[in-house]
Image (cartoon, helix red, strand yellow):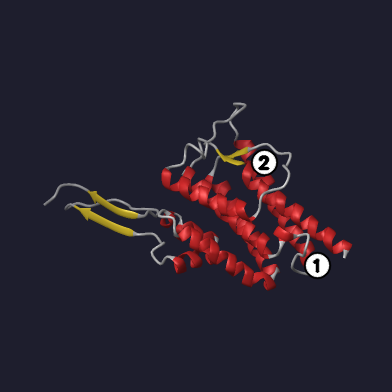
Amino acid sequence: MAEAVGLAFAILGAFNDAIQCFEYVQVARNFDQSLQTAVLKLDIPKLRLSRWGQSVGLDRVETAVAGSREDHQKAKELLDQIVDLFEDAERVSGKLKPPAKDPAVYDTTRDLDEASASLHVKLQRLSLRRFKPRGVLNKAKWALYKEKSLNRLIQDITELVTGLIELFPAARSEQRRLCEQDGAELASDEHISLIAPLIEEQDPELSASIKSANPSAQPNFHITFAGSHNHGLQQGYFSGHQTNTFGARP
């Protein structure tokens, strides 16, 4: 029993470290893509990881944590790998760091647009309500400079969290319940359609819960092109109404 409790606390420590790693990532002002997208891309796997933690009992570790001893050991390995991913990404970004001692970084409390700030705050609040990190890692904040590095980090973390979820099939019903809670809260945000494609890609279960709670919570497309000589390229995703006029009218 003592060994099982000790291993459960070891998982909690690894989980705590993995969650905290998200807090040390900043976005450099010369980041080569959208600040809004970068911040929200990091928020989504953090929420998914926190949801897994609660579903297996890490919020009440003194009582019990789901799974066998072997499951606990594998879970700790996966959580440690998440920490390793952040450390690897930090090393890569360190090579891109400009000569200045303190590179300019965005401040998420001031630099996000209104819609992204609303979503960022809600995603953060959902994560922290579920799990508040205990203690502080002895780490300094670091900055991302390239979208390629961010996307690789997010993809690898997403795969590891999927591995954690699959490792505890007995917790899937609790996972679904928590996912429905998150989906209902996010579906009520008027800006949710802005990140619907990101959530669908990174957290399909949450995406399904949001759509179930609010069928209109998906990207809206309405494009009008006017003119006799229309040439151009519309690329990416957006929400709302767009009207473009090219060339001269007939």
| For residue 76, above or below residue 92 | below
Write down the residue under mark 1: 70
Q: Residues within 10 Å of mark 2 (few under 14, many from 20)?
A: few
Residue projecting furthest to the right: 2
Residue drawn at x 49%, y 41% as measured from the top left: 32
| For residue 173, above or below residue 16 | below
Write down the residue under mark 2: 91
| For residue 196, above or below residue 69 | above
The one nearer the camera, 99 or 108, is 108
Residue drawn at x 84%, y 58% as measured from the top left: 6
- Relative side of 191 to 53, left or right: left
- Relative side of 21 to 235, left or right: right
Residue drawn at x 66%, y 46% as measured from the top left: 21
The one nearer the camera, 156 or 70, is 70
Residue drawn at x 55%, y 55% as measured from the top left: 44
Residue 123 x, y percent position in the rendering = 54, 52
Q: Secondary structure at mark 2?
A: helix
- Relative side of 124 to 18, left or right: left
Residue 151 x, y percent position in the rendering = 55, 51
Q: Nearer the viewer, mark 2 or mark 1?
A: 1
2 or 1: tag closer to the N-terminus: 1
Q: Is residue 33 visible?
A: no
| Inter-mark Cα distance, 2 to 1 | 32 Å
Residue projecting furthest to the top: 100
Q: Is residue 195 visible?
A: yes
Which image quadrant: the N terminus?
A: bottom right
Q: Residues within 10 Å of mark 1 (few under 14, many from 20)?
A: few
Residue 41 x, y percent position in the rendering = 53, 51
- Residues at badges 2 and 1 in contact (C-beta under 8 Å)? no
